[in-house]
Amino acid sequence: MFDNLSDKLQRIFKNLRGEGKLTAANMEEALREIRVALLEADVHFRVVKQFIEQVKQKAMGEEVLTALSPGQQVVKIVRDELIKMLGTHPSRLRFSNEPPTVILIVGLQGSGKTTSAAKLARLLAKENNRPQLVSVDIYRPAARQQLTILAKNVGVPIYEGSADETKPLDLARSARREAVHSGRDVLLVDTAGRQHIDDQLMQELHELKEALAPTEILFVADAMTGQDAVRSADEFHKRLGITGIILTKMDGDARGGAALSIRSVTGQPLKFVGVGEKPDALEAFYPDRVASRILGMGDVLSLIDKVEQAIDQKTAEKMQEKLLGDDFTLEDFRDQIKQLRKLGPLGGLLEMMPQIGPLKDLKNAKIDENEIGRVVAIIDSMTPKERRNHMIINGSRRRRIAKGSGTSVQDVNNLLKQYAQARKMMKSFTGQAGLLGKKLGKMKLPMIPGL
C-alpha cells in the first residue's frame, strides 16, 4: 500500500536533509519531484496541483528557509497537507436516533459491495451493535445466496425474503420490518450494481433512498481501478448523494492514487478500507496514520489496534514474562508464532513499522509464510517432553520429528538453532528486564521469529 510513493518521497526528503542550507532553488526542485511522484502514484492532477501550491506557500516562507532543521520542517508541512488531502479527521459512521440505522451499500458491479457489506456487519457486531443484512440484488445470479453464505460466516443474521418478494423495494421494506421486530439496530442493504452507471440503476437507488431514508449511503470502489474509482464515486455522489466511501483491495494497490484523490474530488470522506479477503480485513480509515505511513513514519497505532483485537491481554502478559525469564520453551515459541499469525500476513505488519534507523529496511524483509507453517509443523511433531526440554532432542529424535512433520533433518536443526538464538537473546535482556518490561508492556507485541 503506497509503497512506490513512499519510497520516492523518502528519497526526496533524504536529499533535502543532505543540503547544507535550504534555498528557494532546491525547494523548487524538491516540489517538482514531489509533483512527479504524486502523478506517478495516479493521484488526480487537480488534487496534485492544489497540494503542491499549499506546500509551496508554507515551505517557501522565511521561517522555514532560515530554520535550524528546514528539511524536517518541510516533511512536517507535507505530512500536514497529506492529512488535509485525506480528510484531516477519521470519519465515523453516523447512527439514527431511532433504530434501525439503515446503511445503503452502493457501487458498480465487481467493486466488492457484497463482501464489504458482510465485513462491515462483522465489524459493527464486534463493536456491540446488532446488525442485520439484506441483499436486494435481484439481477446478478446467486448474489443473494452469496450474501447468505457470507452472513453465516461472520455470524450476522440476514433477511432472505419470501418467494413472492421479487422487487428490491419489497425486500428492503420487509427487511426493515424484520429488523424492528427482532431488535436489530443496524440494517445493511446490499444493492445491485452495473458494469456502468445508467438511469435504471440510479432510479432504483433513488427509490430505495426515498423509502428507507438511510443514515449512510456508502459507495464501494475498487482501489486497483485508480482514477476510474474516483470518477465513479464522484458521479454517484452527484446523482445520489453518498455519505462516505469504502475502498476495497487497498492491500494490492501499490500506488494509492484513488485513496489520495477520492475525498478531494468527491468532497465525501473515505471511511473504511478493505485490506484482504478474510472477514476481518476491513479497517477504519485514519488520515493521520496513513499520512505517517506514506512518509515512512510507520503506523504503530494501527498495529497496536490489530494486536489488541487479535491477542488476549492475559495471554500476552504471560508470554511477556516468559520471554524475559528463563523458561521460554519450544511450546511457547510455537504459541508465539500462532498468536502472530492471527494478525494477518507478516509483510503487512512490517509495513506498519517506522522505516527509520535500524528498522529502515524492515519492509523489504522477505518472509516466507510457508516457512512459518513448517516451523509450527515441526514443533507439533515433537512430544510434550521434547517441547519443554529441547536438550533431549538427539539424532534419532530429530529424524523422527522430520519424518512426522514432512520436513528434513536439516529443517529441524535450523529450527532448534533459531530457537536457541532466541533464548540466548532473551536471556541477555534479563538484567534489563525492568526497563524492557516497561517498553514491551506498552505494546504487548509478539516477537517475529527469524527477524
Image (cartoon, grey):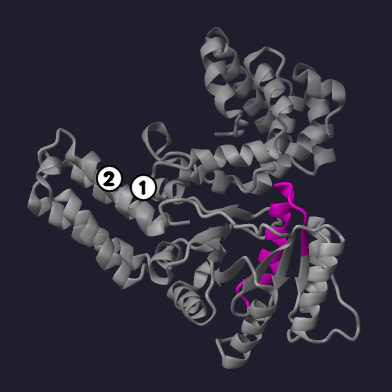
Residue 295 has which mark? 1
* Disc 1: CA contacts within 10 A as few (<14), some (14-19) or many (>=20): many
Quarter of the image holding residue 324?
top right
Q: Which residues are magenta?
A: 110-132
User: Residue at the spot x=76%, y=76% of the render?
Assistant: 172
User: Residue at the spot x=52%, y=75% of the render?
Assistant: 241
Q: Earlier in the sequence, mark 2 or mark 1?
A: 2
Q: Secondary structure at mark 1?
A: loop
Task: Please give left or right for residue 270 compared with residue 101 in the image.
Answer: left
Nearer to me, 18 or 120: 120
Residue 30 visible from this viewpoint: no
Label 2 and label 1: CA atoms lie apart by 8 Å
Q: Is residue 166 above or below residue 2?
A: below
Nearer to me, 281 or 447: 281
Q: Quadrant of the C terminus?
A: top right
Residue 75 has which mark? 2
Q: Main secondary structure of the magenta part?
A: helix
Q: Secondary structure at mark 2?
A: helix
Quarter of the image holding residue 47?
bottom left
Q: Is residue 220 above or below residue 321?
A: below
* Disc 2: CA contacts within 10 A as few (<14), some (14-19) or many (>=20): many
Instruction: Name which residue type carries label 1.
Output: Leu
Instruction: Name which residue type carries label 2.
Output: Val
Task: Please give left or right for residue 327 compared with residue 231 in the image.
Answer: right
Residue 416 has which mark? none
Q: Are marks 2 and 1 in contact (CB under 8 Å)?
A: yes
User: Residue at the spot x=70%, y=19% of the render?
Assistant: 328
